[in-house]
Amino acid sequence: MINITDITILDDLQASWNYPTSIRFGVGSISRLADACKQLNIKNPLLVTDAGLVKQAFIQQIINNNQKAGIEIAVFSGVKPNPTASNIEQGVSVFNQAKHDGIIAVGGGSALDAGKAIALMVKQRLPIWDFEDTGDNWKRVDADKIAPLIAVPTTAGTGSEVGRSSVIVDEKNASKKIIFHPDMMPDSVIEDPALTRGLPPHITAATGIDAFVHCLEAWCAPAYHPMADGIALEGMRLIKQWLPAAFNNGDDLVARSHMLVASSMGATAFQKGLGGIHALAHPLGALYDKHHGLLNAILLPYVLHRNKPAIENKIKHLAHYLQLDDISFNGFMNWIMDFRAALNIQNNLSLIDINLEKKELVGRMATEDACASGNPVILTAIEYSQLFECAVKGVLK
Ligand SMILES: [Zn+2]
């Protein structure tokens, strides 16, 4: 049970940043939520979270603490693990019926994505799919009508709190779609590492590797973006150093602090681009309803191996920065395999009950995914199907 009354403040790891948005960082920073609301002129916010988190003590503590500061929080907890368009519609109607004036999204990637999409949609005239992340669709958004939004992550992985998009499930054709607008970046973020203490080890591992993959795919994406590259490298170094500690002892707040900031770094870096790991993880998440971070963690070495001809030098540079013993592509691959194994990540997709039945469909959906264009090697649907087969069978080729 996550409680916010029994924590030790880590003075060295407290900060306020304004990059890439306003961030109040550090153990205990949830107590600064009322300040964030006041700064954005929010008096009557709707707190968006999921059915599991709403039962945690800290949600009621947040409500009580803010009430004392004159802020009346109502709760919408109808967010599924992979949020759907109907979840968003329900949230929008609750927001409008009670005339709320802002959103506080609290949770993992799903709750944050749902909160961001609700904030986007509360006053729009067009349906959500009109804002899918292709071409210039985002320009159809009436940006003045987006509700003020505060994000409070409770996992360290998606980095959705500093991202400008939401992944929403289109139930009609069982696909995940990316909804994008630059102003979907939350206006304010509270990053309190104490809120991530409740994550069980397997979720800590899967979400932590998701953050690593965000940095890695951004680093390998071919676009020219040295700022993103710098953030990606340091994000991976932090995860290498601190994810095993957070996995082995969930109450290690120093490890939880570094993992939470590394997660935001991943999403900041991936403005540069993602790649084939995400292009495959998105259809697999939609078709098999599996955890996004776990899918990425399993897919990681297979896609890396496939991309080798295009990324060998970049991976050597990365291996050097991470101070690996063997500064080579193979040295990095070996380290990744050991790192994954130490976090109890399954080695192939068959071990999480994914088979080859939908092989062709997966390949086709991967090429249609927005992340495919960031992969260092542009792969056809047949090539993605083959890569998927390798990841199911556990074969590197
Ligand atoms: Zn991801």
Image: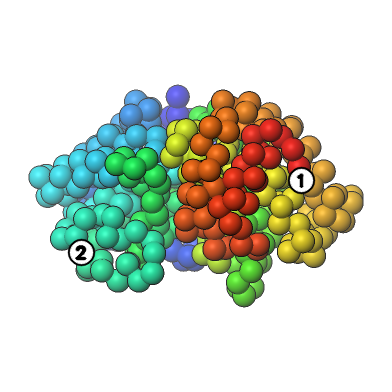
Which mark, residue 145? 2
Image location of residue 310, percent across then percent down: 73, 64
The residues bearing labels 2 and 1 have C-alpha atoms spaced at a distance of: 50 Å
Give how far across and how far down residue 191 sits, in percent.
47, 49
Whether residue 245 appears in this view of the structure is: no
Q: Nearer the viewer, mark 2 or mark 1?
A: 1
What residue do we see at 71% from left, 45% from top? 301
Q: Residue 323: horizontal and vertical position, in percent?
A: 83, 54
Q: Is residue 201 left or right of residue 194?
A: right
Image x and y of residue 160, in percent: 45, 51
Q: Is 383 in front, or is 200?
A: 383
Q: Earlier in the sequence, mark 2 or mark 1?
A: 2
Residue 106 vertical placement versus 332 (above, below): above
Q: Amino acid at mark 2?
A: Lys
Q: Is residue 101 left or right of residue 299?
A: left
Give the residue at x 35% y 71%: 136
Q: Which structural element holds mark 1?
A: loop
The residue that label 1 is drawn on is: 397
Name the image quarter holding the N terminus.
top left
Q: Quadrant of residue 147?
A: bottom left
Residue 203 position by quadrant? top right
| Front residue of this view, candidates 375 and 149 | 375
